[in-house]
């Protein structure tokens, strides 16, 4: 039996790699890279007779290394877990939160792009976000969500 077939049989019924495990993996390697960076900074400050700074970088090294290892262990746990339903639910929650962040980022990006032509504001009653063309003076606005009428300056 080839290695590939043995690997397929081993992973059968296990969660495998999903979006959340990829995120955890990248995060763990980021922390481990930070640990390496703190090691170099510790050595650099040790040569300059800055013992206090060297000690701080050593402590930061242990924190970063510890977090990196914990996240790597969590990654292995998620990838090889046989409780697929629970892992999929975690992945779904992660993807939902990431989608909210992406929408928020896209909204902020669009507002920045439209900043010269539109004024963005919120309804004072329900906090619904709205926009109106700039340089129209004082206008009367009706909220589309709660039908509250108010006057605002563009």
Image (spheres, rainbow, N blue to C red):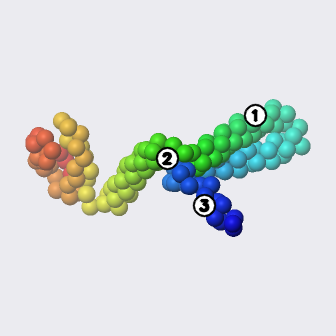
The answer to whether any part of residue 58 appears in the image is: yes
Q: Is residue 144 left or right of residue 83?
A: left
Helix, strand or loop status at disc 3: helix
Q: Which residue is mark 2?
A: 84
> Residue 52 location, x and y as percent?
81, 32
Q: Residue at x 85, y 44 (%)?
A: 43
Q: Residue at x 20, y 38 (%)?
A: 126
Helix, strand or loop status at disc 2: helix
Disc on the earlier residue, 1 or 3: 3
Nearer to me, 151 or 87: 87
Q: Disc 2 versus disc 1: distance between alpha carbons?
A: 37 Å
> Residue 83 location, x and y as percent?
51, 43
Q: Residue at x 10, y 43 (%)?
A: 147
Q: Which residue is mark 1?
A: 59
> Is the residue marked by circle 3 packed among few (<14), some (14-19), or many (20+) residues within 10 Å?
few
Residue 150 - label: none
Image quarter of the N terminus: bottom right
> Residue 2 location, x and y as percent?
69, 67
Q: Residue at x 20, y 55 (%)?
A: 132
Q: Which residue is mark 3?
A: 8
Figure quadrant of residue 58: top right
The answer to whether any part of residue 26 appears in the image is: no
- In front: mark 2 or mark 1? 2
> Is the residue marked by circle 1 packed among few (<14), some (14-19), or many (20+) residues within 10 Å?
some
Q: Disc 1 versus disc 3: distance between alpha carbons?
A: 42 Å
Position above or below: 121 against 116: above
Helix, strand or loop status at disc 1: helix
Disc on the earlier residue, 2 or 3: 3
């Amino acid at each position: 039996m080839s290695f590939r077939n043995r690997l397929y049989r081993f992973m059968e019924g296990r969660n495998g790699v999903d979006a959340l495990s990829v995120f955890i993996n990248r995060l763990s390697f980021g922390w481990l890279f930070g640990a390496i960076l703190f090691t170099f900074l510790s050595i650099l400050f040790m040569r300059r007779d800055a013992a206090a700074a060297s000690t701080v970088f050593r402590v930061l090294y242990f924190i970063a290394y510890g977090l990196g290892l914990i996240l790597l262990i969590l990654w292995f746990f998620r990838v090889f877990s046989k409780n697929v339903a629970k892992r999929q639910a975690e992945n779904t929650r992660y993807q939902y939160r990431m989608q909210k962040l992406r929408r928020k980022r896209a909204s902020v990006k669009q507002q920045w792009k439209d900043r010269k032509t539109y004024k963005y504001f919120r309804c004072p009653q329900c906090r619904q976000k709205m926009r109106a063309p700039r340089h129209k003076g004082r206008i009367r606005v009706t909220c589309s969500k709660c039908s509250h009428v108010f006057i605002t300056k563009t």
